[in-house]
Image (cartoon, rainbow, N blue to C red):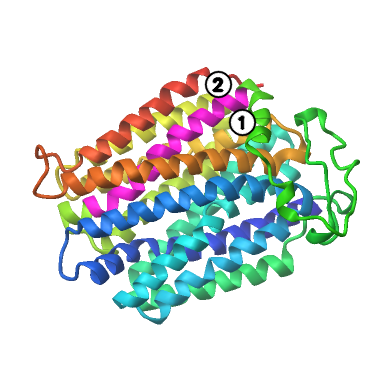
């Protein structure tokens, strides 16, 4: 009963956090274009800056995700959740105050720095929290429910943006982010038992040498120290490689996660600027598009996925999700009229299976003392894709949306994103569940 209560508070925390995060997405393209290229629907500078920002964020999270995941195994999920949930408030607060060019650049710098720590870390820690409280047989369904909660927040956030002014959008986002932090600190219970957590973070030292499922007593040899330095417990590249080599399935899932993230980030880096240039989409159209995608994803993860997972298993459901990821990306790339993107967004009903199934497969390959480390490792690998993807796809998008395009195909960069998703799909068939 206590575990169910803990999960319900986690779900509410994730809902509020994602509500705050997602509601600014439809507005940020218009804010960026207004600050950098007022009155225009095409702006290479905006595309390049967005791509550069995503690459820098990916480079930062490549380091911080494994660190945060590993530290959460030692100091608790709740303590580590406090950091990103506090930092994420600042960028929205800046644009809530003003969206002029100078404030936009201030937002750009602060968001880049904060996201190097925050991007993906809340999801990573939430997945580890679920793995702490849910047996293996029910993890895929519960991960799906967690993703469904995030999708419902995506719907609510984008729906609220549809009816709010741009300034109000960022003000509400900042307030909800504060509410999420306060709720988490007051109501969320730690998922690791007290004996497994060191007392304050700065007075703790552990050997950090977990060995997968065999490491059932991995906390038994950890000793307190007054002079410990937190970053000495950071996982090294050798630690990450050892973790990946400990399970063939884990390493296979990591490769699929890399190509999946390569496609996902490439699509996000290009899609909004493509739709704005091709069909003159604005904040309201982006919000409607995301609401359709979010509703389909929510229904799928909360209703369909729990029914299909026991029948098909995570590996087959992952293949289904990746197949429809390919379909929806290619459909965006050849959109011939304004309603095609709305149809493509409805494939969220099926492609949302990919992420929770992948994370569930990963969680089964390690013991309870390494859930944060494993999820952080996969997030770090995904972050490496986040570095590469914008550097490849953002210049390609800017080129094919400009008058200098080698041939008339505005969606060519998105089609290239589709090839990365096809690679993830073909690789998923080698995954063997253990």
71 over 255 or under it: above or below: below
Looking at the image, which residue is at 26% across and 59% down?
46
Look at the numbered disc 2 and give the secondary structure of its residue: loop
Instruction: Measure the C-alpha gap from mark 1 to mark 2.
Output: 9 Å
Nearer-the-camera pick, 414 or 113: 113
Looking at the image, which residue is at 59% across and 61% down?
84
The answer to the question of whether label 1 and label 2 lie on touching residues, with beta carbons closer than 8 A, is yes
Residue under numbered circle 1: 361
Q: In the figure, is residue 99 to the left or right of 143?
A: left
Residue 259 image-quadrant placement? top left
Q: In the figure, is residue 123 to the left or right of 218?
A: left
Q: Quadrant of the C terminus?
A: top right
* Disc on res. 108: none
Residue under numbered circle 2: 431
359 over 185 or under it: above or below: above
Q: Residues within 10 Å of mark 1 (few under 14, many from 20)?
A: many
- Residue 334 horizontal/vertical position (percent): 19, 38
Whether the magenta-drawn stretch holds residue 145 is answered as: no
Looking at the image, which residue is at 71% across and 68% down?
185
């Amino acid at each position: 009963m206590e575990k169910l209560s803990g999960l319900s508070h986690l779900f509410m925390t994730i809902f509020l956090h994602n509500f705050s995060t997602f509601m600014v997405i439809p507005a940020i393209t218009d804010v960026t274009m207004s600050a950098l290229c007022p009155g225009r629907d095409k702006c290479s500078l905006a595309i390049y800056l967005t791509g550069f920002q995503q690459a820098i964020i990916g480079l930062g999270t490549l380091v911080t995700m494994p660190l945060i995941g590993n530290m959460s195994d030692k100091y608790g999920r709740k303590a580590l959740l406090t950091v990103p949930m506090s930092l994420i408030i600042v960028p929205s607060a800046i644009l809530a105050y003003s969206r002029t060019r100078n404030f936009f650049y201030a937002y750009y710098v602060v968001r880049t720095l904060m996201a190097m720590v925050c991007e993906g870390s809340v999801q990573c820690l939430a997945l580890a929290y679920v793995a702490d409280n849910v047996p293996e047989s029910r993890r895929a369904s519960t991960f799906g429910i967690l993703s469904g909660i995030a999708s419902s927040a995506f719907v609510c956030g984008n729906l609220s943006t549809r009816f709010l002014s741009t300034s109000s959008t960022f003000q509400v986002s900042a307030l909800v982010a504060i509410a999420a932090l306060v709720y988490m600190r007051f109501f969320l219970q730690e998922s690791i038992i007290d004996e497994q957590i060191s007392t304050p973070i700065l007075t703790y030292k552990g050997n950090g040498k977990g060995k997968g499922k065999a490491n059932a007593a991995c906390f038994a040899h950890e000793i307190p120290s007054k002079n410990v330095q937190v970053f000495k417990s950071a996982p090294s590249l050798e630690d990450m490689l050892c973790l990946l080599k400990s399970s063939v399935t884990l390493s296979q899932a990591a490769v699929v996660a890399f190509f999946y993230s390569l496609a996902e980030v490439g699509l996000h880096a290009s899609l909004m600027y493509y739709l704005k240039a091709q069909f003159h989409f604005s904040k309201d159209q982006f919000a409607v598009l995301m609401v359709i995608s979010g509703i389909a994803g929510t229904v799928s993860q909360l209703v369909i996925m729990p029914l299909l997972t026991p029948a098909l298993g995570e590996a087959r459901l992952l293949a289904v999700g990746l197949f429809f990821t390919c379909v929806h990306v290619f459909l965006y790339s050849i959109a011939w009229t304004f309603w095609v993107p709305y149809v493509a967004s409805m494939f969220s009903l099926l492609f949302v299976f990919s992420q929770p199934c992948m994370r569930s497969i990963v969680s089964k390959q390690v013991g309870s003392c390494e859930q944060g480390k494993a999820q952080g490792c996969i997030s770090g690998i995904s972050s490496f894709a986040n570095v590469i993807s914008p550097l490849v796809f953002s210049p390609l998008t800017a080129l094919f949306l400009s008058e200098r395009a080698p041939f008339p195909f505005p969606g060519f960069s998105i089609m290239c994103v589709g090839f990365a998703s096809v690679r993830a799909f073909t690789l998923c068939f080698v995954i063997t569940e253990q």
